[in-house]
Amino acid sequence: MVVILSSGSVATIFTHGDADGVSAAALALAALRLYYGSVNVFFSNPVGLVNDFIRDAEGDVYIIDIAISEAHAEEFAEVVRGYEGRVTLIDHHPLPMVIDVNRLNVKLIHSLECSASELTFKYFRDALDPDYDRVALYGAIGDYLDHTPWVVKRLERWDKRQIYFEAGILALGLEGSRGMYDFKRSVVEHLSRNWRPSQLSELTIRALTQASSLEKLHEWVRDHVLTKDNVAYVINPPGSLGIAAAYAMGVTSKPLGVAARERDGEYVISLRAERGVINLDRVLRGVVKELGGSLGGHPWAAGGRLPKGRFEELLNYLNNLLKREG
């Protein structure tokens, strides 16, 4: 049984803005409002987490579904050590190698085997109605982690078609709401009441619009994809980088897809790999100091930022690695 001992009247949630992060934050909000007079929700990412923490953290802090960036891990450790409130980290990304998170003043809820939503539901389950498991299912499906034993078992409690329908609306609706943090905050509040995503009309409309945009994105990738032996890549796709990377891999039948978008002299990049072919997180963390930027994620899905002039080096490195692995 989880006992939440609040150190004040305020809690702060930092979460990722995708379906998994939003669903996990909703579960945390539903539980934490029982213990705190005020719970604030902010959206962050591995690169911006330290600055966001310094600016917005108040009371006890819950960091959910945000990887601790290798490049910023030591800064994160310093900030956490000097923070007076309690800090809880609920995450499913690989932990940084340059620091030992277990030795920080942080309560760590961590697994590489499931979604952040699943982890969050399990952690707060004693404060949640059992039917909140469907909110966790939305997040797990949205993050392609819907084959864990817990998800399979919990899906038996519901009509699977309805759960996947609602998860699709949530994932696509959020994908079509990039940068709209007030709207995403309203989605967190909506889900924290265990209301269905389809009951939020703006989210549903955005999901329908995004579904149409993805069709156009697929056509664009098919017409603009480039290849370098085992790597397929696109530059400046008109839509989601992660989906564009997956499409690049799919339309070329290459084991690795990469999508990059230029921003302020950098490339924001996303990578997708066939499972079991390469561990993207381990590879990227291994070259980040050499190439610069901030890179990491999951074994099959990763991303980050890279100096524009080093992008070709990254492609060559990945291609040569795949050749050796093959």
Image (spheres, grey):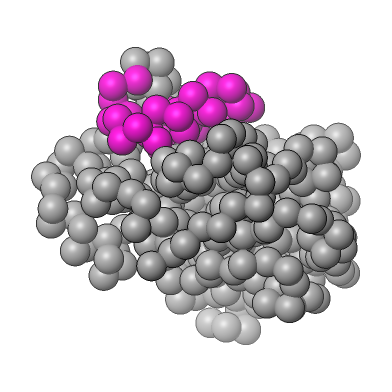
Q: Residue at x 83, y 64 (%)?
A: 81
The residue located at (61%, 78%) in the rendering is 323
- Of residue 20 and residue 102, the one placed in the foreground of this image is 102
Rendering coords of residue 70 (x, y %): 77, 66
Residue 313 sits in quarter: bottom right
Residue 187 counted in the magenta span: yes
The residue at the point 86 percent across, 35 percent down is 264
With respect to residue 9, does 270 lie above or below? below
Residue in the image at 86% along x and 59% along y: 82
Q: Is residue 104 found inside the magenta-colored segment of the image? A: no
- Count the marks: 0
- Of residues 284 and 223, which is closer to you in this image? 284
Q: Quadrant of the N terminus?
A: bottom left
Of 220 and 1, which appears nearest the observer? 1
Chief SS of the magenta region: helix
Q: Is residue 135 left or right of residue 61?
A: left
Whether residue 16 is visible to the viewer of this picture, yes or no, is: yes
- Residue 123: x percent and y percent? 43, 61
Give residue 295's position: percent from left, percent from top.
73, 60
The residue nearer to you, when weighing 191 against 282, is 191
Residue 256 is at least partly visible in this image? no
Instruction: Determine whether 284 is above or below 60 in the image.
Output: below
Q: Is residue 241 left or right of residue 274?
A: right
Q: Quadrant of residue 219?
A: top left
The residue segment tinted magenta is 171-200
Give the answer, above or below, for where 143 lies relative to 197.
below
